[in-house]
Amino acid sequence: MALKYDLIQGKDMSEGAGPDAKLWYARAAAADHMTFDELCDDIAESSTLTSADVKATLDRMAWVISKNLQNGRIVEMGELGNFRMTIGSKGTITKEDFNTSLIKKPRVKFYPGKRIQTARTETKFERIDVEEDTVTEVTETV
């Protein structure tokens, strides 16, 4: 199986490009959607847990991750990777002028573990041509 992509034309953002210059860029095209129930069923099939056990565990996991991120902790998820909260803010000239209203909405960052990093490096790509409904197979890996 390969990651499908199509091409879209967008503004050329490279230095020295003319105001009307355009380039073609790759955009990932989702092949399908895995539902939460399907995920739980797949995990249950390869373990001693029932689908209900998996659902309950993942539900609780989301709560625990959220609580710990709000407390400034990095949450390690084994081979899955790590979650951490990051923030940005508007700046002030002096420290005394700074207050929390200047802090932007926090972002949750995910840093993939080795298994997911390996999946990224071993991904093959398959180009789809949306207008013509044709598929061009590309066997390159990144």
Image (cartoon, rainbow, N blue to C red):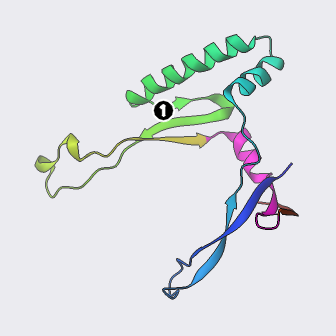
Q: Is residue 17 above or below residue 32?
A: below
Residue 126 sits inside the magenta stretch: yes
Residue drawn 25% across the image and 54% down it: 90
SS for callout 1:
loop
Residue 135 rendering spot, x and y as whole percentages: 86, 62
Residue drawn 68% across the image and 16% down it: 54
How many dots with numbers?
1
Choose between 54 and 34: the one closer to the eye.
34
Residue 7 sits inside the magenta stretch: no
Query: Picture quarter containing residue 71?
Result: top left
Residue drawn 48% across the image and 37% down it: 84
Q: Is residue 127 above or below residue 58?
A: below
Residue 69 rendering spot, x and y as whole percentages: 44, 30
Q: Amino acid at mark 1?
A: Ile
Tell me where the magenta segment starts and ends, as one range.
112-132
Residue 4 rendering spot, x and y as whole percentages: 78, 55
Residue drawn 21% across the image and 43% down it: 101
Residue 12 rendering spot, x and y as whole percentages: 56, 79
Q: Is residue 2 above or below residue 27?
A: above
Residue occupied by mark 1: 74
Is 116 on the left or on the right of 67, as rendered? right
Query: Picture quarter containing residue 103?
Result: top left
Q: Is residue 73 above or below residue 92?
A: above
Q: Which residue is situated farthest in the left direction here?
A: 96
* Disc 1: CA contacts within 10 A as few (<14), some (14-19) or many (>=20): some
Which quadrant is home to the C terminus?
bottom right
Choose between 125 and 115: the one closer to the eye.
125
